[in-house]
Image (cartoon, rainbow, N blue to C red):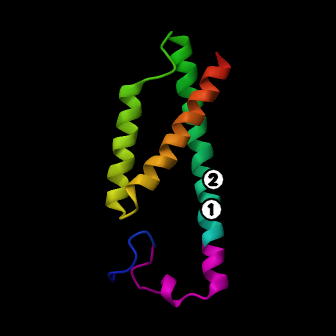
Amino acid sequence: MTDSDPAHDTDDAGLEPTPDEMSLDELRSEIREIDSELVRLIARRTYVADSIARVKDAEGLPTVDETQEQRVMDRAGENADRFDVDSNLVKAIFRLLIELNKVEQRERR
């Protein structure tokens, strides 16, 4: 494998074109696929967060767990560094996801 974009998967034979070798339409198509995958992952994360909310409710636990939220933020920053993505951007996205989950949890109680 060459020193290409670490977020771009290629097979061992290198048959898949790198982003630098793709046309504008191909690049936009790849963005559409990535966007779809992001939404799928957000839906999956939301489903798991809803399950956590039900467990918290059943066990009489508070909606907010600042220690866990900090763990999530730390992990987000570490993953951003690992993939060479702006840590502030990634943390902002995760803050938004956490806040949306907390709102949904509060509304269900």
Name the residue rendered at 60%, 35% in the picture: 100
Residue 104 pos. (x, y %): 64, 28
> Residue 91 location in percent, x, y?
43, 48
Answer whether residue 106 is visible to the viewer in this image: yes
Q: Nearer the viewer, residue 22 or 93?
A: 93
**Left or right: 28 as drawn, with respect to 81:** right
> Would residue 16 be seen by someone viewing this image from the given angle?
no
Residue found 66% across the figure and 68% down from its top: 32
Residue type of the residue flagged with mark 2 = Val
**Considering the image in quadrants, where does the N terminus appear?**
bottom left
Above or below residue 46? Residue 20 is: below
Magenta stretch: give its range: 9-30
Instruction: Determine the secondary structure under disc 1.
Output: helix
How dense is the environment of label 2, judged by Cα within 10 Å: few (below 14), some, or many (20 and up)? few
Looking at the rendered structure, the secondary structure element under dot 2 is helix
Please name the residue shown 41% across and 85% down the image: 13
Residue 35 counted in the magenta span: no
Quickly name the residue at label 1: 35
Residue 29, given in percent of the width and then of the height, sits at 66, 75
Which residue is the site of mark 2? 39
Q: Dividing the picture into quarters, in which one does residue 47 lie?
A: top right
The label on residue 15 is: none
| Label 1 with label 2: CB-CB less than 8 Å | yes
